[in-house]
Amino acid sequence: MARKGEAALDLEAEYNNRALCPDHPAVMARWKASAEAARAAHPPVEIAYGAGERERMDLFTAGPDRPVAVFLHGGYWQALDKSWFSGIAPALLAHGVGLAVPSYDLVPQVKLGVILDQIRAALARLEEATGARPVVFGHSAGGHMAAAMLSEGRAASAVAISGVFELAPLIPTSLNRALGLDELEAEALSPSLWPAPEGAVLDCIVGGLESSEFIRQSRDMAETWGQQGAETRFEVPAGLDHFTVLDPLFAADSALIRRIVELAC
C-alpha cells in the first residue's frame, strides 16, 4: 500500500543511487585502492561461516581479547563483496578495535531471506570465535541488515549508514527485477516493522546530499524505534552523498569512527 504522497515521488530516481551520484566510479575506485593497501599492511584471516563460496569473512584482529566491529557492505544485495571494504580496517585498528567483513550470496541467485540467514550465521560464527556479540555497522543494504540483526539481539548495537529499512518502495523500481520482492515479503523483511529491543542502540546516519527517500527512511527508522524504547540517533552530515557518506570510515579521527569505537568498547 502506498504511503501518503508516495505516488508523487519518482521512486526509480529516489532509489537509483548510481544515477544520482555520477562520481561514484571514482569513489568506488578509492574504496578498492584503500582495500588493497590495507590488506597488504594488515593481512586478514579468512573465516568460513558456511559451506558456500561466498560464505566467508575477513577478520582484521586488533589482538587477543580486543573488540571486533562487523561491517555489512551495500550494493542493493546484488553487488560487491568483502574485498572492497578492507580499507576501513586501519581506522579501527588505530583504536584497538578489530574489523570483520563478511561476503554473502547475491540476488537474484538467492532470495533476500537467504542473505539474512547468511548474516545470522556470520555473526554467530564471530561470536563463537570472540565470545561477545559484536557491534554491527552497515551501508545501504548493509544498514538494513545491521538493523535486522540488532532487532534479533544478534548485535550489541548498530550503526546504519544510508540504510533501507522499509522495502515496499523498492517494488515498483528496476531494482526489484533482481530482488523479486512482493508486498508480503517486503513487509516481512522490513526492519522498520520489526520490534526494537528496549534499550538497544541504533544510529541512523544519512548524507545530506542523498535523495529525499533515503533521508526519510533513516529519519523514520530512528523515530519509530525510538518510540518503542530504543536509544536512537538520526544524523545528516552535510555535503555527503550515498557514496561519500562512507568517507569518514577511512579516517581514524572522524566522529563516525570514534562513535563505532565507543560502541565497541
Image (spheres, rainbow, N blue to C red):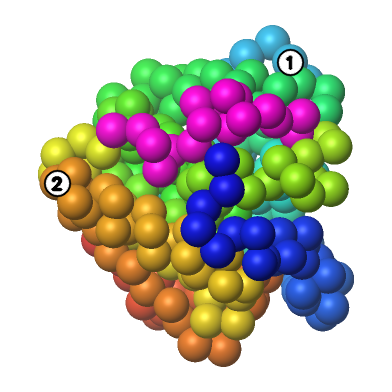
* Classed neighbour count for the residue bearing mark 2: other residues with Cα under 10 Å, few (<14), some (14–19), many (≥20): some
The residue singled out by tag 1 in the image is: 52
Above-or-below relation of 193 to 89? above
Tell me the amino acid under the disc marked 1. Answer: Gly
Position of residue 236 measured from the top left corner of the image (x, y, whole percent)? 43, 77
Give, as a single range, the part of the protein colored magenta: 179-195
Q: Residue at x 69, y 10 (%)?
A: 51
Q: Residue at x 62, y 30 (%)?
A: 183
In the image, which is nearer the foreground, mark 2 or mark 1? 2
Observer-nearest residue: 11 or 1?
1
Whole-angstrom CA distance, mark 2 to mark 1, is 38 Å
Q: In terms of image quadrants, where is residue 223?
A: bottom left
Position of residue 141 measured from the top left corner of the image (x, y, whole percent)? 61, 47
The residue singled out by tag 2 in the image is: 229
Tell me the amino acid under the disc marked 2. Answer: Gly
Position of residue 155 measured from the top left corner of the image (x, y, whole percent)? 33, 36
Residue 43 visible in this rendered orientation of the protein:
no
Give the side of residue 79 with respect to residue 206, left or right.
right
Which one is earlier in the sequence, the residue at label 2 or at label 1? 1
Magenta segment includes 182:
yes
Q: Residue at x 67, y 35 (%)?
A: 103
Q: Secondary structure at mark 1?
A: loop
Q: Residue at x 76, y 21 (%)?
A: 110
Residue 20 visible in this rendered orientation of the protein:
yes
Q: Secondary structure at mark 2?
A: loop
Observer-nearest residue: 229 or 30?
229
Give the side of residue 13 with respect to residue 86, left or right.
right
Above-or-below relation of 73 to 36? above
Q: Which mark is residue 173?
A: none
Screen quadrant of the N terminus: top right
Number of marks: 2
